[in-house]
Image (tube, helix red, strand yellow):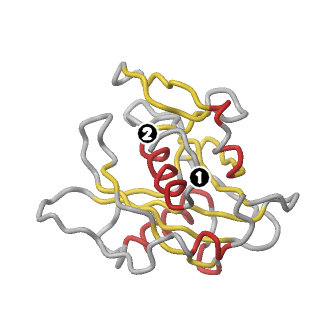
Amino acid sequence: MISHWRELQTVLDQGYREIDDGTDVPRAAVAAVFRPEEQGRGSELLFIQRAVKDTDPWSGQMAFPGGRREHDDPTPRATAERETIEEVGLDLGRARFLGSLSELDGGRATDRRVIVSAHAYWLEGARPVLQPNYEVADVVWVPLRTLGDNTRYIDYNYPLADTLFPGIRLDRDGQVIWGLTLRFLSDLFDRLERPFIIG
């Protein structure tokens, strides 16, 4: 499933523009980083597991590398690239930029509104050596075929909302992709016209 960057680039937005709804909502950006699988059967996608922190409502959650936009970030892409360097030590300056996914509201489960954009990159060559910082408990490369495997689809209980959400169970205990990250994946799979856990 998806063995070449061109297959992704053709379905992603090439002319990304920030949506301005006239409000002062905080903004953030994440990087969806793809690379060919080692066995050559498709591609894989980089995820981080956030470090456990009492004051973080997303403590311990799976996500793409990224974070809040700072005043000196010239673009959302710059935010995603800066945060990726800070969080996992990966410089996307040499990666191929593929395009962007749709902007999403990232605060639906916590009532803390934040507009998040996702920007996609393709890495060639061997897996890079990553250096997670204090914000990151783990980094995982997940094949796209794993994300499309419906035997992994579960109902995930998010304790702060006491509600069940759709999720994808990964191989390591406690690692479930859900929420905003799952919604970005749903956007991607819709664009690729592949079946997925949510539409």
Outermost right residue: 39
Q: In this view of the protein, which residue sits in the foreground, 79 or 37?
A: 37
Q: Secondary structure at mark 1?
A: loop
- Three-letter code, disc 1: Arg
Look at mark 2 in the image and give the residue it sits on: 179
Q: What quarter of the picture does the N terminus occupy?
A: bottom right
Residue drawn at 36 percent across, 57 percent down: 116
Residue 131, percent across and down? 68, 57
- Tell me if residue 118 comes above or below residue 145 in the rendering: below
**Residue 115 as seen in the image, left or right of residue 58:** left
Residue drawn at 45 percent across, 62 percent down: 118
Tags 1 and 2 in contact by the CB under 8 Å rule?
Answer: no
- Three-letter code, disc 2: Gly
Q: In this view of the protein, which residue sits in the foreground, 73 or 197?
A: 197
Look at mark 1 in the image and give the residue it sits on: 194
Quadrant of residue 36 within the rendered picture: bottom right
Residue drawn at 68 percent across, 52 percent down: 144
**Nearest to N terminus: mark 1 or mark 2:** 2
Q: In this view of the protein, which residue sits in the foreground, 88 or 101?
A: 101
Outermost left residue: 22
- Tell me if residue 143 comes above or below residue 34 in the rendering: above
Classed neighbour count for the residue bearing mark 1: other residues with Cα under 10 Å, few (<14), some (14–19), many (≥20): few
Of badges 1 and 2, nearer the viewer stands 1
Residue 193, percent across and down? 55, 57
**Residue 195 as seen in the image, left or right of residue 198:** right
Classed neighbour count for the residue bearing mark 2: other residues with Cα under 10 Å, few (<14), some (14–19), many (≥20): many
**Residue 79 as seen in the image, left or right of residue 132:** left
